[in-house]
Image (tube, rainbow, N blue to C red):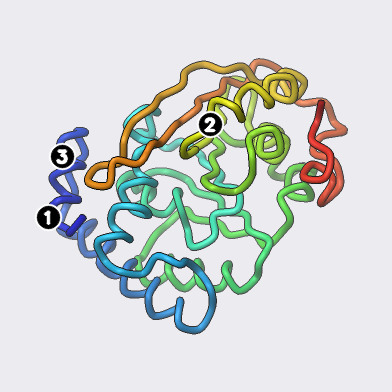
Amino acid sequence: MNETQFLKALQEQGIELTEQQRSQFRSYFELLVEWNEKMNLTAITDEPSVYLKHFYDSISAAFYVDLKGDKSICDVGAGAGFPSIPLKICYPELKVTIVDSLNKRIGFLEHLAAELKLENVNFVHARAEDFGQNKTYREQFDIVTARAVARLSVLSELCVPLVKKGGLFVAMKGAAAEDELVNAKKPLSILGAKLKKEYSFLLPIEESERNIFVFFKVKNTPTKYPRKAGVPNKSPIS
C-alpha cells in the first residue's frame, strides 16, 4: 500500500488527512526505519507494508469506534506506537497514554512524539499488571486498546481494569479470534466487561483477516485484578 492508496482507503472510510497529517505519517515511517537499525521495533520496515500493516491496520479501530472529541485512550503494550499513534495523528484531540514494559521503546516514542509535535501524549514505563493497580490510571480511560499483545483471556486482565465504567475495551485481533473470544468469556465477565459488538474485515490488498472486538465496561473491576506481573499469562482467569 503506497501513500496514495493509503489516503484513498482512508477517504473511503470518511477520514480525510491534511497535508500536515500526511507529513506526520511520512516522518513516522522514516523515524521507525531509522530507530529500527538501533533497536528491534518491528520486523516490517518496507514502506508499503508499514503503511498497510501498521498505519492502516491501526487506524481501522476508528472505522468502528467513535474517536471524535477529547476522549482519553490508553494503549497497552504499544511497542512502536501501534495502534495509538496513527490514531492520534488522525484525531489530534485524543488524549493518549501508552504503557510499555521496555524503556528503550518508551525512549523511541518520546522522541517520535516530539518530532511529530504531538500534544496530550503520555508515556509510562511499566508492566501492564502494575500499571493497572496504579490509582492514577486505574479505571480512568474512556477507551483502552491493544494490538498483538496477548491472547484475549490474558489481555482482558491487563486492559479492562483501566477502563472507566461506561467506557470501552477495544481488542484488535487477526484470524482465530473467535476461539479466543470463547475462552475469554468468563474472565471478561469477572472483570466487568460485556461484548458490545464484533467486527470482521479483510485488510486491503493482502486480504488477511482482521477482527475487532468492542467490549463495554458494565461494572467496576474487582480490586484483586490485575494480579502480579506474569501471573495473568501463566494462569489466565478461568
Q: Residue at x 63, y 58 (%)?
A: 100
Tally of numbered tags: 3
Q: Is residue 179 above or below residue 101?
A: above
Q: CA distance from mark 2 to mark 1?
A: 31 Å
Please name the residue that numbered disc 3 is placed on. 11
Task: Assess disc 3: are there few (<14), some (14-19) or many (≥20) residues with their C-alpha within 10 Å of its C-alpha.
Answer: few
* Secondary structure at numbered mark 2: helix
What amino acid is at disc 1? Thr
What amino acid is at disc 2? Ala
Q: Is residue 35 above or below residue 129?
A: below
Please name the residue that numbered disc 2 is placed on. 177
Please name the residue that numbered disc 1 is placed on. 4
Q: Is 220 on the left or on the right of 60, as rendered? A: right
Q: Residue at x 57, y 20 (%)?
A: 216
Q: Is 33 on the left or on the right of 180, as rendered? A: left
* Secondary structure at numbered mark 3: helix
What amino acid is at disc 3? Gln
Residue 80: percent from the left, percent from the top? 49, 62
Task: Assess disc 1: are there few (<14), some (14-19) or many (≥20) residues with their C-alpha within 10 Å of its C-alpha.
Answer: few
Mark closer to the chain start, 2 or 1: 1
Of badges 3 and 1, nearer the viewer stands 1
Q: Tell which of 134 and 179 is nearer to you.
A: 179
Do tag 2 and tag 1 residues touch (Cβ < 8 Å)?
A: no
Q: CA distance from mark 2 to mark 3?
A: 27 Å
Specify the quadrant of the image occupied by residue 223: top right
Of badges 2 and 1, nearer the viewer stands 2
Q: Is residue 163 above or below residue 132?
A: above
Do tag 2 and tag 3 residues touch (Cβ < 8 Å)?
A: no
